Structure formats: C-alpha cells, structure tokens
Amino acid sequence: MSDATQVVHDDRDAVDFTPAPLDRSSRFYVAGHRGLVGSAIWRRLQAEGFEDLVGRSSAELDLKDRDAVFAFFAEQKPRYVVLAAAKVGGILANSTYPVDFLSDNLRIQGNVLDAALEHGVDRLLFLGSSCIYPKFAPQPIVEDSLLTGHLEPTNDAYAIAKIAGIMQIQAVRRQYGLPWISAMPTNLYGPGDNFSPTGSHVLPALIRRYDEAVRSGATSVVNWGTGTPRREFLHVDDMAEASLHLLEHYDGPAQVNVGTGTDVTIEEISQTIARVVGYEGETVWDTSKPDGTPQKLLDVSKLRDAGWTSRIGLEDGLRSTVEWYREHTGNVRE
C-alpha cells in the first residue's frame, strides 16, 4: 500500500460532532447554485424552509479569483456551505481539455474551502464524482477503493482534482476539528443539465441526439462505443435530497457514495430514451470511439446506513427530464 493510500484511509479524525437538523434561519451558501446539482439543492433547501440562501453566478463571482472569493465570504459570512461548483463535462471535453479540468477545479475548490475555513463555516458538504475511483475497481465500488488503482485516462485530470478536494476535507477535520463532509454522486441527470453536443455527459447527450432525430425525421442515430459499458444514473432531485440528509444525519472523514445501487448498459439506457422521446429508427454504434470505464456501480451501503435511499425511478426521471428539455429547447445550457 502506498503512502498516499495510507493517508487517504487514515482513521485519525479530530471531529467531535453529532449530526442534527440545520438551523433554517442561518445563512446557507450554495456554490454553483445555477448548475445541475446546485440548482436542485437550492430548490430542495427552499422547499425545506431555509430562509437565508445565498448564491452567485459565475458572472457575479468568479470562484477562480481567490481575492474575490475571500471578500465574498468576509461579507456574507455563511454558516453552512455546499460546494457544488465545478468545471464538468463528458468524455470528449475531459480528454480534450485536461489542463482546464484540473486547474480550474483545483482553484475553485481551494479558494472556497480556504475561505470557508478562514471564516469558520460550521458545516460544509463537498461534492465530487464517482470518477475518483480506479477504472477497474471491484464492483460495486466501496469508498475504500479510493487510490487503489489506475484512473480512467479520459477523465483522470478531473478525478485528481476531486480527490484533492476529498483530501482537503479530511485535512480540515484532522487539523481544525470542523465537521465537514464529502459525497461522491454517481452519474446525475435532470432539469438544468448541460445538453451540449460536445460538452455534455452521456445521458443528456443521448436525450438531445434522439430528440433531434425525432424532430428531423432521421432514420438512424449514431452513438459512441459499443453500448456495453454499465452505468448508474441518479436523478438530481434525489441527489439534492441526499445532500441535505447527509448534512443532518452523517458525519465522518470518509467520502459517502451517493447513487441508486443499480446500473444499466449504455445500450439499455439508449433504448429507454428512444422509447421516451418516441424515436422508432435504428441505433448504430461507432466502435471506433472510446467506451470509457467498463462499469461504474457504487456501493451505497454507507448512505443507506445513514438512513437514505433513492426514490425516483429511471424511466420516470427520464420522462420528466425530456419534458423539461423540450420545454427549454433553444434556451438550455450549452
């Protein structure tokens, strides 16, 4: 076992904290509140009665600007923080711009976490991604698989940035005793997703592709890879519910996997999307394009032990997402 792995799995923890309901009147900053995850968390917090939510768009606050981030925290003094802001993208974007995904995310995370530490944020949730785990990790993936093997090369830069975020949360707990936590969601989808043909993740890309085929009357749709990789998908409203649940019911240095505990092949999800959007043509698989990781299914035992399980079924979630996409066509995030 490497020294790095020993550090990540180090049981030292200076936190003495019992999770409890958050104060609905305290100031709560959602970093990335207009993104897929952040906007869902914002909606959930509003529904739960939080009275003092704070958010800033990237135009209003560039989280890569350290001085601006520290000034924001000094002015706003949030008691609670969810760090959902990140530069994200699919296989093509990650493999084409690895420097951007590494550098931007390290700066975003470092600035927000350092500012939150300086201003004594009581409770903080850092959100990462299941891509932090090794490409060939045993399935389903347990939290202890972190740093036990090689990463998927197409998004290793992004993964390293997120691993650094987990390490910073653990370091803050050890050095300062603050009850900050981190969660690693599986593939997320839902209202507010990025449907860009070049920058999106697999599920929104498939929704756009099949919907455009229906609109144009195309008789075939071409998808990347073989269709055989297996993926787990979680509706973003479930993720938002899980995030608040963890803040109020979980504490510990280890990151928590957030998912459904079940997966499907890319071919199966493509068939489901085709059915939902009403596409009846042929699907062709371009096997010259990369598949990515063969399987990514998270072990969600820790999450279930904390008292939460997903509730939105995949087909129901897809139907509501397609409806949202069609209502916002021409005005979706690119």
Image (cartoon, rainbow, N blue to C red):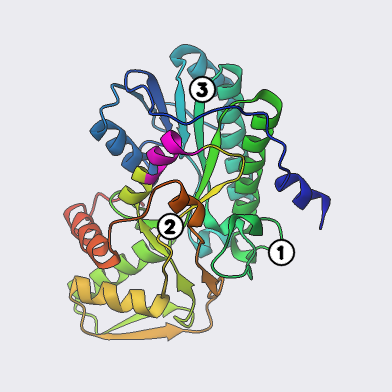
Q: Position of residue 227 (x, y in %)?
A: 44, 80
Q: Please state which amino acid type lies under the numbered disc 3.
A: Asp
Q: Position of residue 27 (x, y in %)?
A: 38, 19
Note whether 304 is above or below 203 in the view shown.
above
Q: Helix, strand, or loop for circle 2?
A: loop
Q: Which residue is mark 3?
A: 122
Q: Residue at x 52, y 78 (%)?
A: 289
Q: Residue at x 71, y 64 (%)?
A: 149
Task: Check residue 245 for magenta coloring.
Answer: yes
Q: Residue at x 25, y 27 (%)?
A: 49
Tell me: 184 left or right of 172.
left
Q: Which residue is mark 2?
A: 259
Quarter of the figure with residue 320: bottom left
Within-10-Å neighbours for mark 1: few <14, some 14–19, many 20+: few
Which dot marks residue 149?
Answer: 1
Q: Helix, strand, or loop for circle 1?
A: loop
Within-10-Å neighbours for mark 3: few <14, some 14–19, many 20+: some
Numbered disc total: 3
Q: Helix, strand, or loop for circle 3?
A: loop
For the record, the magenta segment spans: 242-250
